[in-house]
Each structure stands twice: as structure tokens, then as C-alpha cells.
Amino acid sequence: INGMIERGKGHIVNLSSVAGKQTYANGAVYCASKKAVEAISEGMRLDLTQHGIKVTNIAPGAVETEFSLVRFKGDETRASKVYEGFDPLLAQDIADAIVYAVNAPARVTIADLTIYASAQSAPTIIFRK
């Protein structure tokens, strides 16, 4: 951060989750950790904007990654069920959002971006076919 302050420009991108926006049952610790990322992003933005440093928080919803496999301790059957019946976000979708945020004109700061799959309306609400 010191180098960015010295240069008078920079961009920090933090990844939280929709779990940082809305707490859900059996997710207290995970949701709390993601709320912390949201608060850190907001605090950094308050402290660093005056130095020309942008801070962006990206909050993805259901993205098909290895997250569910880790959460279910390698149980591939349980992990794959998380993404059944709808078209989840892909890692590339989140990467595209980050590219947009960091390449936005100097006059623009994408402060906070929540991204859901089209079938998702809240952290725990997904309309499946």
C-alpha cells in the first residue's frame, strides 16, 4: 500500500461473498468472515481514496468452483448437487467483473459489486429446474 500511496494511484480488489451481505443458517462463521471483508473494503476505501487508490469489493453468489468440494470434505456427490438444476456463475464471470472494475476510467470507482447467477435471488434462494 505504501508504494501505491507514494505513486498516488493504485487499485485493491477484495473478494467477499453474498454471504457477507446476508447471514444464513449454519453459516455464522463463514458469513462473519465475509462481512469482515466487506468492512475492511469499506474502511480501506475511506482511508485510501484521498491517495488516489481505488478499493473494490466483489461479492459473488453461487460460483461453480472447488469450494463445495472443500466444504463437503471431498465428497464429490454432495458437492455436485450444489450446482444441479441451474446455470451457476463461472470463475470467468468473476474475473470479467474484476477486469471491468480495474479498467474503468479514472473517474469511476466500482466500490461494491454483487454478482448472482440468473437463477439466484439471495444467498440461499436458487430457482432450480
Image (cartoon, grey):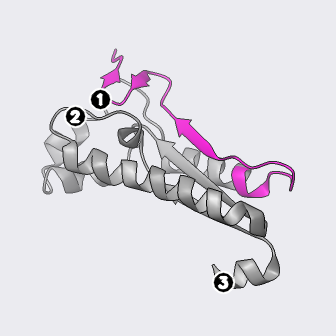
Structural distance between the alpha carbons of marks 2 and 1:
5 Å
Q: Amino acid at mark 3?
A: Asn
- Residue 109 visible in the snapshot: yes
Kindly identify which residue carries mark 1.
Answer: 84
Label 1 environment density (alpha carbons within 10 Å; few <14, some 14–19, many ≥20): few
Q: Which residues are magenta?
A: 101-129
Q: Amino acid at mark 1?
A: Glu
Query: On screen, 84 above or below 129?
Result: below
Residue sitting at x 77%, y 84%: 6
Q: Earlier in the sequence, mark 3 or mark 1?
A: 3
- Residue 85 visible in the snapshot: no
Label 3 environment density (alpha carbons within 10 Å; few <14, some 14–19, many ≥20): few
Query: On screen, 12 above or below 117?
Result: below
Q: Is residue 114 magenta?
A: yes
Q: Earlier in the sequence, mark 3 or mark 2?
A: 3
Structural distance between the alpha carbons of marks 3 and 1:
45 Å
* Labelled pair 2, 1 in contact (Cβ < 8 Å): yes
The image shows residue 19 at horizontal and vertical percentages of 35, 40
User: Which quadrant would the N terminus be assigned to in this image?
Assistant: bottom right
Kindly identify which residue carries mark 3.
Answer: 2
The image shows residue 75 at horizontal and vertical percentages of 12, 50
Residue sitting at x 43%, y 21%: 121
Kindly identify which residue carries mark 2.
Answer: 81
